[in-house]
Amino acid sequence: MDGFTIGHLPDQIDDRTSVSDFEYEWGDVSFSSRVWERTVEGGGARVVLQVLVMRGAGLTDLAAVRDFLAEYHERAPDWELTEFDNNGRTALHGETEAFWTPAEGVAVEVRDAFGLVGQEELLATARGVGAENPG
């Protein structure tokens, strides 16, 4: 997906889950998004997991990505995030998201917007995202 592979998916992603890819732009950043959804009783669907690859000149470092995502997700300025090691890169995670900057101008985010997969699986999925052609 836009130069990245997704090597781990939570158990909640199964044969009852559909997957879709989207591309769009917001705030001078281009997004490639893969979304896994599950149909809910009564109609409609609920997002189980989302992986986003973002590209833009303003995504210079982790602090810039944090600021961008705070605006994009409409988070308060005191958005509480915790650092974690993502395969040798410093990354940040909150209750429902994990993100990092694999290169200047590129950011990756894994989202569990409804808290369906849990933080352990969210971080495992984040750690399973890697460059298609490393090195």
Image (tube, helix red, strand yellow):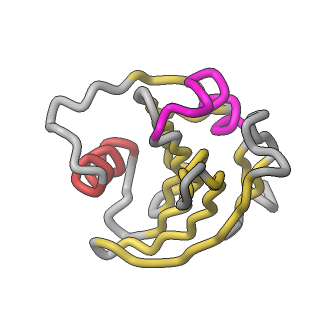
Q: Nearer the viewer, residue 81 or 44?
A: 44
Residue 135 visible in the picture: no
Residue at far left of view: 77
- Residue 26 picture quarter: bottom left
Q: Residue at x 50, y 32 (%)?
A: 115
Where, quadrant-wise, is the C terminus in this rendering? Answer: bottom right
* Residue 134 location (% of width, % of height): 78, 55
Where, quadrant-wise, is the N terminus in this rendering? Answer: bottom right
* Residue 4 location (% of width, % of height): 71, 59
Instruction: Decide: is 77 above or below 103.
Output: above
Residue at far front of view: 42
Q: Residue at x 69, y 37 (%)?
A: 125
Residue at far right of view: 15
Count of all numbered marks drawn on residues in the image: 0
Along the horizontal axis of the image, is 40 left or right of 11? left
* Residue 21 location (% of width, % of height): 64, 71
Residue 96 visible in the picture: yes
Q: Nearer the viewer, residue 135 or 120?
A: 120
Q: Residue at x 63, y 62 (%)?
A: 34
Q: Nearer the viewer, residue 25 or 102?
A: 25
Q: Which residues are magenta?
A: 114-127
Q: Residue at x 50, y 37 (%)?
A: 98
Q: Is residue 110 magenta?
A: no
Instruction: Decide: is 48 above or below 115.
Output: below
Q: Is residue 118 magenta?
A: yes
Instruction: Decide: is 21 above or below 48.
Output: below
Along the horizontal axis of the image, is 66 left or right of 89? left
- Name the chief secondary structure element in magenta: helix
- Residue 79 picture quarter: top left
